[in-house]
Each structure stands twice: as C-alpha cells, then as structure tokens.
Image: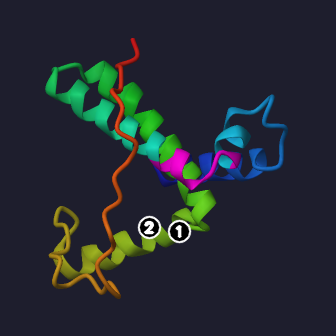
Amino acid sequence: MTDSVARLFDAVIAARGTDPAKSRTARLLQSGCDKMAKKLAEEAIEVVIDALSGRPDAVVRESADLLYNLVVLWVHAGVHPDDVWAEMNRRERMLGIAEKLPKNVVQAPSRRKVVALESRRIRKRR
C-alpha cells in the first residue's frame, strides 16, 4: 500500500506544475487550502454514508477519492508520506498497530481551533 501512496504522491508532485486547465490536480492545488480541506472532508463523509448504507463497492471508490484528496493536501502542506509512515511506526511501538494514541500522549503544542466549513448541503454523487 505504501508504494501506491508513494506513486500517487509523486504523481501529484508532478502535476503541481502543469496547466490547471488540463489537470484536475493542478487546479485543486491552485484552489487553496480551504478548497482542498473541503474536498477531503466531503470524501470522508461520502465514505461514512456509503459504509452506513452497506455499500462496500461505493466505500472502495470513495476511499480511493479520499486517499487522493488526502495526498493532495499533504503535498500542499509539505508533508511526505514517509513522515506519516514514521508516525504510524512510532504509534505502533507505543501501543500496537490497532490503537490510536490517547490525547494526553500526543505531544501537540496547543489545541487547534475548530473552523466551520462552508455550510451547504452536499449532494451524493451517483
């Protein structure tokens, strides 16, 4: 899996400098962090809706969209997949692979402010 994400990351990096009229990825990267974050959130919601609806085939498709949008946001934020894998390995050493770190163990400088996304009704694509 990490190879697939690495290839996707490299493809997004390569698309960064292309013509936004011809590349959806270039267009998304130029749209700004707000738009990228909204797309990521939209795809996450679609995965949840499809999972709750018992549609595993749709969960697969929407999960691929979710990963794509996550990688686009990583590129924008200057995050490399290897950094994420290193964090996953660190957590596994601390608690095991299936566990999420408790909030009191995560070393965050301060709590981040929650920002409301544009409130609009999201219609499910078919």
Image vertical order of residue 5 relative to residue 95, above or below: above
Camera-side residue: 61 or 33? 33
Q: Are marks 2 and 1 in contact (CB under 8 Å)?
A: yes
* Magenta-highlighted residues: 30-37
Q: Residue at x 28, y 78 (%)?
A: 111
SS for dot 2: helix
Picture quadrant where residue 110 is located = bottom left
Residue 116 location (% of width, % of height):
34, 52
Q: Residue furthest front?
A: 119
Picture quadrant where residue 21 is located = top right
Q: Residue at x 43, y 74 (%)?
A: 86
Image vertical order of residue 56 relative to residue 83, above or below: above
Mark 2, residues whose alpha carbon is within 10 Å: few (<14), some, or many (≥20)?
A: few
Q: Is residue 35 magenta?
A: yes
Residue 57 location (% of width, % of height):
31, 19
Residue 54 placement, left or right of 115: left
Q: Amino acid at mark 1?
A: Asp
Q: Residue at x 38, y 43 (%)?
A: 41
The tag on residue 82 is: 1
**Residue 4 in view (yes/no):** yes
Q: How many numbered markers are drawn? A: 2
Mark 1, residues whose alpha carbon is within 10 Å: few (<14), some, or many (≥20)?
A: few
